[in-house]
Image (cartoon, rainbow, N blue to C red):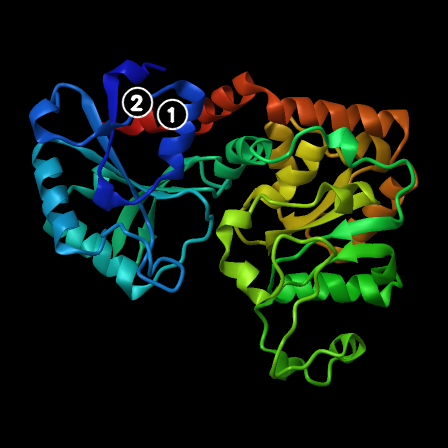
Amino acid sequence: MVINDIHFWYHPITGGSGVQCLMEYYFGVQFKMYDSDIVDSRKKNIIVFLWEPKNEHTINFKFKTNKFEFFELIKEMNNLGFYFLADYSTESNFFIDSERVEFITRIRQCGVNLNKFYLVTNNSNINQGKSKYGKHHINYIHFPHFLSATPIEMNKYLGDLDLYKTNNPTKEFICLNRRVHKHKFDFLKKLWKRGLLDKTNWTWVCNYINLKDYEEDEFVKYLKIDINSFNSFQLQDDVMYGTKLDKADEFLYTINPIWYYESKVNLIVESNSFDRPIHLTEKTFKPIFLGVPFVIFASKGHLDKLKEFGFDVFESVIGKYDCTNEDSVIDAGIRLSKTYNSDSVIRICQHNKLNLHNFDTHKQIIQKYFLRRFESNII
């Protein structure tokens, strides 16, 4: 990988970028502040900007990727032969909306050949390729954002984990949910129906289902939920209480390790499930960071991708399970809870933790899944 032949650039109006932060951290790549006078057109020059619409999550951001100044900048860069990376590496889904389609239209109106435009996502289904986005065809490429960001972010505030550990867990499981969509609701309901919810440290912080459609649901009635005014279900000593935590992404990696160590097995319910894109988020990597056993309810191929990245998913202990089926995942969790502190499980947890903390592992994965594939495709 010849990074020296590639120059990465940023500009204040293009927004913060996870790709920039992680490339600088793991490779020491210096993103240059854009200045047309110092651009070497003999190199492959790349500007990275945040791919976000103007919505409730970004309304207070200072970047201006939908403003006149941004598109004037794109025109200038295009004349200098730039490549354009739209950083959507914290997401995996292909949300196609009119604003994003219009954004790409304006990019084209600036003279940009879409062969030189890439949408970077956390979608592990995609290695590299071109897909239709509205009326456009654009390049997609995978960047394993959460895999590489989680150890950096969690190391910032967690010190000696032994201070939190206990030899006598009070719960069988932990199942944390910030934004509860239907598949997360169904999973929690399944735990309840199987008599396991009371044996679980669980949360339901913000509601993303239409509770009026669930007014007669037995689980909603059991929890005594006010369908007109939802109140969060949270654990003791959380960083914030109430549904505002949903938008407080500064707490994305902030957890209370006690919750995990007081539980035998982490039942991870990932953001995506069933046939949706593989989305390995911080939910998957938090228990690995802490060195605790886990099973995962997610989308098809999620466990295989974890293994591809060098992690062990406890199949030698509990056998294979279907990560797209609630009962299969729960059954696997029950099997794992019966041997959670065995030597074989502890060895797997230690292996996974070391792999996540291995600096060279992250460099190799970013090189393989992002840099090499991107480099091989640029003109």
Structural crowding at the residue carrying mark 2, measured as other residues with C-alpha within 10 Å and reported as few (<14), some (14–19) or many (≥20): some
Residue tagged 1: 24
Contact flag, marks 2 and 1 (Cβ < 8 Å): yes
Residue at the location (27% across, 14% down)? 4
Q: Is residue 112 left or right of residue 86?
A: left
- Residue 31 in the image: above or below residue 143: above
Q: Is residue 48 left or right of residue 300?
A: left
Disc 2 or 1, which lies upstream in sequence? Answer: 1
Q: Quadrant of the C terminus?
A: top left
Asked whether 277 or 287 is in front, the reply is 287
Residue at the location (75% across, 41% down)? 294
Residue 237 at x, y percent in the picture: 71, 53
- Residue 328 in the image: above or below residue 154: below
Q: Amino acid at mark 1?
A: Glu
Q: Quadrant of the N terminus?
A: top left
Residue 33 at x, y percent in the picture: 21, 30
Q: CA distance from mark 2 to mark 1?
A: 6 Å
Q: Amino acid at mark 2?
A: Gln
Structural crowding at the residue carrying mark 1, measured as other residues with C-alpha within 10 Å and reported as few (<14), some (14–19) or many (≥20): few
**Residue at disc 1, secondary structure:** helix
Residue 87 appears in which quarter of the rendering? top left
Q: Mark number for residue 30?
A: 2
Residue 281 at x, y percent in the picture: 56, 44
